[in-house]
Image: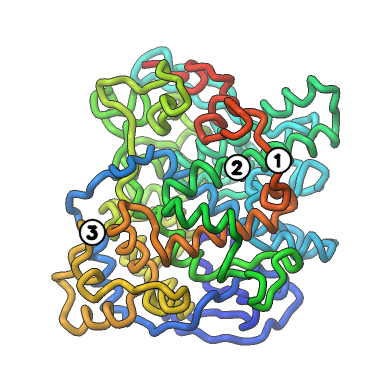
Amino acid sequence: MKQHGTNSFFVVGEGVLEFDRDGTATTRAPLTVEELRRFRFSRLGPEGTPLDEETRIALATAMTADVPQPDSADPSIPAGFTYLGQFVDHDLTMDRTESQLGEDVTLDELVQGRSPALDLDSVYGRGPQDRTDRIFYAADGVKLKVGSTSPVPFPDERVNVALEGFDLPRFGAAGTTGADRRRPLIPDSRNDENLAVAQTHLAFIRFHNRVVDELALRGLTGPRLFTAAREQVVRHYQWMLRTDFLPRIVDPAIVDDVFANGRRFFEAPGRGRSPHGLQPTMPLEFSVAAYRLGHSMIRGAYQWNRVFNSDGPGGAATLFLLFVFTGTSGNFDPGSTLPDLDNPNSGTVDTLPTNWIADFRRLFDFTEADRPDLAPPTADGGNVTKRVDSLLVNPLTQLPAGTFAGRGTTFPEIERNLAFRNLTRANMVRLASGQQLAEFFGVEPLTDEQILVGDGGVTLDALTDAQKAAVTVATPLWLYVLREAEFNHGRLGPVGGRIVAEVFHRAIEGSRTSIVREPSWRPAFGPDAQTFRMTDLLLFAFEGKADLLNPLGD
């Protein structure tokens, strides 16, 4: 499941669920060893009722209408958490044995590699000792590679220099087409599909390398140093997710209940699966619906750095430009159109232009970490996410083909619409409705009026009466959890929040390194033994220096 938009799923207990070009689903037993080695999905609730294509189109069109959308406010969430969430999704769904299908893989590696885990394998791959993945590592076999930016003259000489360590490493001359040369030298190329997630991935590379430097002072070297650094990085990452990321997007009472009292529904004791035995699976309800909450948090434009902001010489960084300035989806050419991005031979430079380096002060709130000196400039400020609700910004109707592995193929234009893709994917896997999951969890479902009217989200007036009836009787789970959030101050509630919190708990528990299985562990690289937030990770990764967190200056 390395690329978005897979047309088949290996669902444990069901078999291979696959679809033809029209989306018609069939289920069959695995035919080959390779199919048994697929990423492991599961189904948490019952199968649901499909929604016809016309209704999906009408619903997707409404959800991506070009209308004003509220920012997150209660609480406000710094915009960097949108793309941290995407980074986490890729970590969860990274298929770590994909490149090893024809080679020797132990049973333990096989099951672990095909199971969701929050252990940063999207950053580490199979490690520096693996003959395929050593390409991601520096010559010492301990640190991860970083890349250099490309000098550009706009808007001044300060950006007309190459800066080492501010782009992902890339294949460069080893590639044939422009897209090949720009391809990121990281285990999961999805982390370069937009610039915000690419710069987030780079921050994790730098965090690892700084932890290596710290542990080397204690006398560790070689493989022992790498192993110790990786374990520390993973534990700090998990702590940050538990204490900083999850409570921003899920009702904190649900998060606290799950992590204090354990899971009640997903691979929980007494429900037929040993929580400490078999490796985790990935519930379709999480992957195809609940965790897609982040799509509603995306802004149409960002105050990116001193060059690209509302008052800067380049104007605000539009969402489309964040796709342009990547290797997986874009071509690093500011004059590109959507067809240009679909062309693998477009573009003239092979690394990120220097004027597009992120100013992390605008993506995260460092005043939360008692660093008022790292507040963004007051002229244009920082960014917050859009509120978690049932609206998506209109640019998400025009996804570049590279974001769903569509370069060089033909497809109906509606498939560029992210909301349509989400609804169709759920339809294809026969996902349970929101009402079915509410019953499964034993919680009061949303009323018909709450589904149809919501609270500041999508307006469904354009749907026919028959379409409205279909949506209220069996509400697509993704729409349901977003409607639920509208009535819960922009956080996931009893259905969506329960799914997300329990899957995170299970994915941490099932990781090779796990703070759930090591409850006495405490962070070492934050301000105290209880605190490690995303801002603390960035401060450590960039040495607490403003000129590294924001190398282009004000």
**Residue depicted at 30% across the width and 26% down the height:** 381
Q: Is residue 469 left or right of residue 547?
A: left
Q: Is residue 316 positioned above or below 129 on the image?
A: above
Residue under label 2, please give it.
239
Residue 62 sits in quarter: bottom left
**Residue depicted at 52% across the width and 70% down the height:** 284
- For residue 521, which numbered disc appears in the image? 1
Q: Is residue 289 positioned above or below 491 on the image?
A: below
**Residue depicted at 71% across the width and 83% down the height:** 31
Which mark lies nearer to you, 2 or 1? 1
| Location of residue 57 in the rendering, given as x and y in whole percent from the top left corner | 27, 72
| Location of residue 246 in the rendering, given as x and y in whole percent from the top left corner | 49, 49
Q: Is residue 309 positioned above or below 519 on the image?
A: above
Q: Amino acid at mark 3?
A: Gly
Residue under label 3, please give it.
457
Cα separation, mark 1 vs mark 3, equals: 41 Å
Q: Amino acid at mark 1?
A: Trp
Q: Is residue 69 left or right of residue 480?
A: left
**Dots 2 and 1: beta carbons under 8 Å?**
yes
The 10 Å Cα crowd at callout 3, few under 14, some 14 to 19, many 20 or more, is many
Q: Which element is circle 1 on?
A: loop
